[in-house]
Amino acid sequence: MVWRASAKIPFAGSRFRRCIGLPLLTQRLFEKNTMPDPIALSLTPRLRSTPFTSRVRAAGIKHFTVYNHMLLPTYLHSLEEDYRHLCQSVQLWDVSAQRQVEIRGPDALSLVELMTPRDISRCAVGQCKYAPLVDSDGGIVNDPVILRLAADHFWISVADSDVLLWARGLAAGGKMDVEVEEPDVSPLALQGPVADTVAEALFGSWVRSLRFFRFRDTEIDGIPVVLARSGWGGQGGFEIYLRNSEKGEALWDRIWSAGEVHGIRAGAPNLIDRIETRLLSYGSDMTRQDDPFEAGLEAYCDLDKPAAYLARQTLDSRRNRPPARRLERLVIDGDPIEPNTDRRPLFAPDHAPAGFVSSAVHSPRLGRNIALAMLATEHRDKKLQVRLANGTMRPAMMANEHWEPASI
């Protein structure tokens, strides 16, 4: 999933209303017995609200993080309660922080190709592609979904890093004939097994035939949107890209009305669902210090594509040698753990450093603690120990794609 920095969109006022009309508000980000490490989040004009913030708060969400300089809800009741509801019903998420970097003009395709080892020339108009953005050193700059709106028009729907500035720098340095801006586009996500039913009530029966990672320009009651079958979760659904932020409350209300009979709730990308599905979080599970091979993203790289891209020489030199470390699934023994708020160190049986846990949570469905971890390949088949935030050590071991621990 993904989100941005500066742009043409106002930081306050009618389009992006503050949560409260005060110059500064301190509110709880996490509360006791729901997430670790209670802290306070201070809202200032630098921290952008969204076109839907008033409705999100009215729905009861009080827990936010900061993503691309913008508010991102984290949960409504608790991670587990929200997870159970998501798996059986439908939720509406404010994912406006998933900002768009818009690239358009004669050299638009060349610029997008330069930023990623994935072959974007094969992306059809109306199609989305997940694509790691990689610099000349092979480091991952972001892992967005790229939408192709026309032959020379793209949205890069970015994770939490300042891709807009990087893209503008590449365009200026390459003297490319393109416009690179942040458009007035703010996505909502309609997610869960009942999402298709709600979407059909809003748009018509055609939505059921919309294929995964395909999108269509459409409208709801005259409100312009792009509807994509996509989302940062494993339960299925849609992302609805609002193209006029002044219509945010009206769009939310219309979707909410269609979903009420189906038990719709406000929600947010869910950590339990994300880890179960192995959806990566940029800045947590990988950064610019990691390359696509280490992050397990080589399936999204076309290293021999015809177009020029920044990382060609570096990635070509690494393609035939196993990485020294790799992002893996882990299971962690013992009682349910709290989600981690920082990277937790891993140790081999001889107490040698073996890597770190980047994301961890207890899965009520699986009945075990599950994690994503950057693990040294020399230790991947060994019994490991992870040091939790309270200083205790827990046994851990690699898991397969079904989260079953490996036999050691």
Image (cartoon, helix red, strand yellow):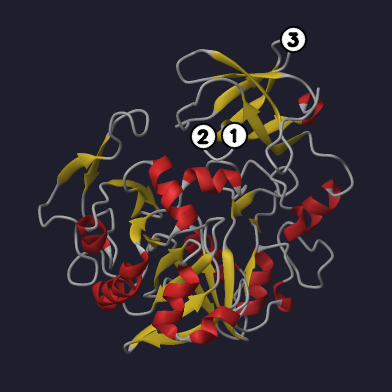
Looking at the image, do the residues carrying marks 1 and 2 touch, with CB atoms under 8 Å apart? yes
The reply, left or right, for residue 129 in relation to residue 272 is right
**Within-10-Å neighbours for mark 3: few <14, some 14–19, many 20+:** few
Identify residue for label 3: 350
Identify residue for label 1: 370
CA distance separating discs 3 and 2: 26 Å
As drawn, the residue found furthest toward the bottom would be 222
Name the residue type under label 2.
Val
The reply, left or right, for residue 362 in relation to residue 268 is right
**Within-10-Å neighbours for mark 1: few <14, some 14–19, many 20+:** many
Question: Which x, y percent locates residue 53?
Answer: 25, 61
Task: Check disc 2 and report its element: helix, strand or loop.
Answer: strand
Q: Is residue 161 above or below residue 176?
A: above
Q: Is residue 238 above or below residue 340?
A: below
Question: Which x, y percent locates residue 315?
Answer: 79, 52
CA distance separating discs 3 and 1: 23 Å
Rendering quarter of residue 395: top right
Task: Check disc 3 and report its element: helix, strand or loop.
Answer: loop
Tell me what residue is drawn at x 75 percent, y 69 percent.
308
Name the residue type under label 1.
Ile
- Mark 3 and mark 2 lie on one chain; the one further toward the N terminus is 3
